[in-house]
Every structure is written in C-alpha cells, then in structure tokens.
Amino acid sequence: MLWEAMSSVRDIRRLHDIGAILVRYGFGDMVRRIGLADALERAGRVLHWHDTQAYAHMAPPERVRRALEDLGPTFVKLGQVLATRVDLFELEWITEFGKLHDHAPPSPWEAVQQQLIEDLGASPETVFAGFDPQPLAAASIAQVYIATLEDGTPVVIKVRRPGIRSIVESDLRLLAHATQIAEAQSPELRAFRPHEVVRQFSQSLRRELDLAEECRNAERIAENFVGYTDADTPGSTIAGAVPPSVIVIPRIYWQWTTERVCVQDRIEGIPGTNLLAVRQTGLDTSLLARRGACAVLKMIVDDGLFHADPHPGNVFYLQDNRIAFVDFGMVGHLTEERRDQLLSLLLGVFKNQPRQVADVLLDWTGENVTDEAELVQDIDSFVDRYRRALLKQFHLAAMLSDLVAILRRHHLMLPPDLSLLVKAFITLEGMGRELDPGFDMGQELMPVLERAARARFMPAALLRRGWRAGGDTLALLASLPRDLSRLLRAARRGRLEIHVDVPRLVQVSDRLDRAVSRLTIGIVVAALIVGSSIVMTVSGGPALLGLPVFGLFGFVGAVLGAIWLLVSVRRSGRVSDDGT
C-alpha cells in the first residue's frame, strides 16, 4: 500500500532505514500493517525480523523514545512535539518524550566551511575578526560557533547542518503517507487525527529549518520588550528600583543572516541549567523566578507571541538579576480571540464559574461531547478544588494536568497552538520552583489576568472590537442581496444542492462497494463454472490434455476468481477482528 502511494523511489533508502529501526525495537507488526514490509520486499531489500530480543524488556514508552532517537532529527523533533500533547498521552509517555535531547555529533568542518563560504560570500576567517572552527554546541538541525566582530563584539554563528533539508523532507513525505494509511486502517488512531498532527508538525519543522525565520521571531519578541521593566507588570509582587531592559533578547546581525546562517550577540551569562553557579554568584533566585514568570505571562497574555520552549537550556541569568532568552526556533502564536478564551477559562476557574470553563473547552475542541452534563459536573469538581488551592500554594502544572485528564476522559482534544501553551506553562512553573521552592504561580498569574480582564473593557478596546464587528456586519449586509439572488436563481433552475458530510457514512459506502465487488466476482465465477461445464459437453474444437480448450480456460479463470474471493473475504475478516 505504501509502495503504491510513493510518487517515486527517491525515499526507498530512507524507508529501509526506518523499517529496520522499527523492527529492531519490536514494532515489526506495525511495519507489516502499514505496508513497509511489502514495499521493501518489492524493492529487493530485506528486514532483519529476528533482531528484536535486545529490546523486549523495555516498556513501550522507552522503546518508542529509543526508536525515535535512532531514527534521526526529524523523529526527535516529532517526539519533542508529542511531549507537548498532554491531551493525547499519559504521564509516562510525556515523561519519556521529554527525555529526547536535541543533540548530535557535529558535521565535518569541511562541509560546514563550504556552506558558510556560499552564504557569507567569503570564508568565516575573512568575514570575522576572530572565528573558532570548533563548534560550541551541535544539535540535530544546526550547530553553533563562536566568533568576534571587527569592533570586538562577541557573537555566535548558528549554522544549519549541510544536507539536513533533504533528509527532513524525505522523512516528512514518509510520515504523511504513513499517517494516511494509519487513519484509513485504524479507527482508534483516526480519533487522534495523526494526519493533522503531522501536518502541523511539518509546518513547524520547515519553519525551524529557516534560521532567518527564527531571527524574525527573536526581533518581534525583542520589540515587545523594549524598555520593559517590572513596573510594566501592574500587580507584580516585585518591588524596589529595577534596572531597564530586565529581559534581554540577542541582537541579530542581518548582513550575515540567511536561511542557513544566523549571526547574533553572544550572551555572557550563567546558563539556566547551572543553578549552583546562580546561587554562588549571589543572584536573587526568588526575584529571577518572579521576573521570568511575569515575562512569559506578558508574552502569552499581552503579546500573543511567546517562547514555546522556555526550558533551562534556553535561558541565561545575567548581572543585576536580568534574564536572557535564546533560541526562538519554536514559538507559539495566539490570536486575540484565543487569548480572550484563555482569559475566560482561567478566570472561570479562579471565580468558580464551571459553565464558563466548559463553554471555552467546547469552543476549543470544536466537537460534540457525548454527555455534556457529565462534563460540566467534572469541571465543577475541578473548579472547586483549584479555587480552594488559591488560598494556599497554587500549582499550575497540576491544574493543567487535571484539566487535560478531563479532556481525555471525554475524548476531546486541544488545538495544536494550545498544546504548546500548556507545555510552556508547565515548563515555566517547573523552572520557577527550581529557582525558588516557595514560588507561587498563582500569585503571579492573578494580577496579570485581572489587568487583562480590565483591559478588555477599556474604551479603546471596546471601540476596536465594535469597529471590527461593525465592519463584519456591513460586509455581510452588502453581500446578502447577491447571495440571495444566487440562491433563488439556483432554486429556479433546479440546481440547489445540500451537501451533508457524515464520516461514518463514507466508511459504510466503502464497505458496500467492497461487498458489491465481491458479489460481482462471485457471479462471474459461477457463470464461468456453468458456461465451462456446458462447453465440456460439446464435441469438436481444439483440445488440451483431451479436454476442450475453451472449457479448460473457463475453469482456470473460475478457480483464480474463487481464490481471489476467498483471500479477500479472509483478509477482510482478519482486519475486522483486530479493529482496523
């Protein structure tokens, strides 16, 4: 099946590597079911089906994580994205996906040097006053080098790995084909919409391959923090005189930045992974925790553009208790409507309004819940529990995990942009508690929510929403005569059509088509048997082995048709038994 879906044989080598790794980790049955085995056998490539014993003792989440690591950068990134889908996976799977580290051996310097010469127009030793060919860090998509500008400014040069785009594009094509087949064969997988997950992942990964896009994200976020201080967050618990530019974003040097190369300021600070050095330096960890939380909340609630992966490796702590964010390859975008929904949900939790929370969740999922009364009852218990938690120490990560558990229980899913948001919130609170065990996310979140709620009803905001709604209404009224005219004209001509899309009906139609095809073959087989029997009784004409040739051919055709029919029925019965 997968072989027939291939537009060419350009991915066959990569297909073999993927199949071999999946078989090695004990996923041979999945390889057969999605058609990888048939494809590779037709190409003359053999999988080593026996090589699975070494990994039989591993739990399924660990085996999947190890397989993703061996499959390469595309699948490591996919695992990191799946780690954000707390609405799809249980805690043990999320924990295992969270262990996927984005590192790899550095690419050979000769290949990197040639690519730099093409992008910079000269060798890096000529362009920069100082350049170290030894990479500072190497990830699956890019690696980083240290350099110095003519004026002595230290910079880092992020270089995309040579040849990585072709590998990623091949993997994305194979993933798209595999998810289409999986959705067609497995109703259980279809409920998780794997094709949509892969489509969103493909868009995100292609953007990450473009280092210039990462730089544009950094600049947009930097613009939002121009002149930002703690005083810009009303209600913050941070007090006292604070320096300007509390949040630092590296400056981009566009004269040397392209799709494959990014040049930016080097941050001279303490990495977020080295908390011991933070404390030894005398930085205020409580202040850093609150500052980081307020900054990320500003990105989410006020700006709608946030760092979607604020883990300790992407954060540096500077003098005067300032914070620097780096690596904007993965950012989240929230529309104004989505931010209003998020605000309504959180305020509904804190102000004991379960119906409001349920309405927002149903708007997010866009699906009909089987028992809405039960959903509201679950949310009522959830809201009551966390409203009481505000009187003590509030745990945002626990609240989000319980909320997602309710979604899973009612077979609802979060949109992809909100899964990134949930992951960012959980990571943010974890970092805050590492810096300050007494960090209370609720104490920082409530003032931000109240300020945002007040801002929604400011005259300027009301005027903007009214102007937008008025424009939409006028556009609707202007197009109404034309739409009514088309509708009446189609009705007069008898061309008025109503399309009803029922997904289950399509499956029933496919099964009916297969049943009719089998019935037709059965009738043809019966006709061949009857016709051949009559021909056998007629004397004369050509003979083979003492039997009339035409009668013999008819029986052979009948036997072949019967074999095909039996195999088809048997295969259909086996598929129905295992639920695919």
Image (cartoon, helix red, strand yellow):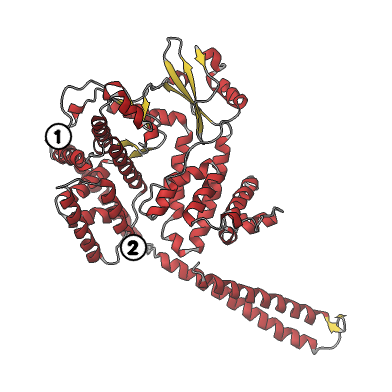
**Is 495 situated above or below 334?**
below
**Is 17 situated above or below 285?**
below
The residue at which mark 2 appears reads as 492
Instruction: Give percent across and percent down for residue 285.
Output: 27, 31
User: Residue drawn 78% across and 85% down?
Assistant: 535
Could you tell me the amino acid type at mark 2?
Arg
**Is 452 situated above or below 256?**
below
Please tell me in which quadrant of the rendered image residue 272 appears. Answer: top left
For mark 1, does the 10 Å Cα neighbourhood hold few (<14), some (14 to 19), or many (20 or more) residues?
some
Instruction: Give percent across and percent down for residue 312.
Output: 37, 34
Q: Quadrant of the N terminus?
A: bottom right
Element carrying mark 1 = loop
User: Residue drawn 56% across and 58% down?
Assistant: 56
The residue at which mark 1 appears reads as 235
User: Residue drawn 21% across and 61% down?
Assistant: 376
Instruction: Give percent across and percent down for residue 215.
Output: 41, 28
Q: Is residue 5 visible?
A: no
Please tell me in which quadrant of the rendered image residue 488 appears. Answer: bottom left
Element carrying mark 2 = helix
Mark 1 or mark 2: whose residue is earlier in sequence: 1
Could you tell me the amino acid type at mark 1?
Gly
Which-is-in-front pick, marks 1 and 2? 1
Q: Is residue 110 visible?
A: yes
Alpha carbons under labels 1 and 2: distance apart: 64 Å
Q: Nearer the viewer, residue 110 or 574?
A: 110
Total number of numbered labels?
A: 2
**Is 273 situated above or below 394?**
above
For mark 2, does the 10 Å Cα neighbourhood hold few (<14), some (14 to 19), or many (20 or more) residues?
few
User: Residue drawn 70% across and 52% down?
Assistant: 45
Question: Farthest residue toward the bottom?
Answer: 537
Instruction: Give percent across and percent down for residue 563.
Output: 68, 76
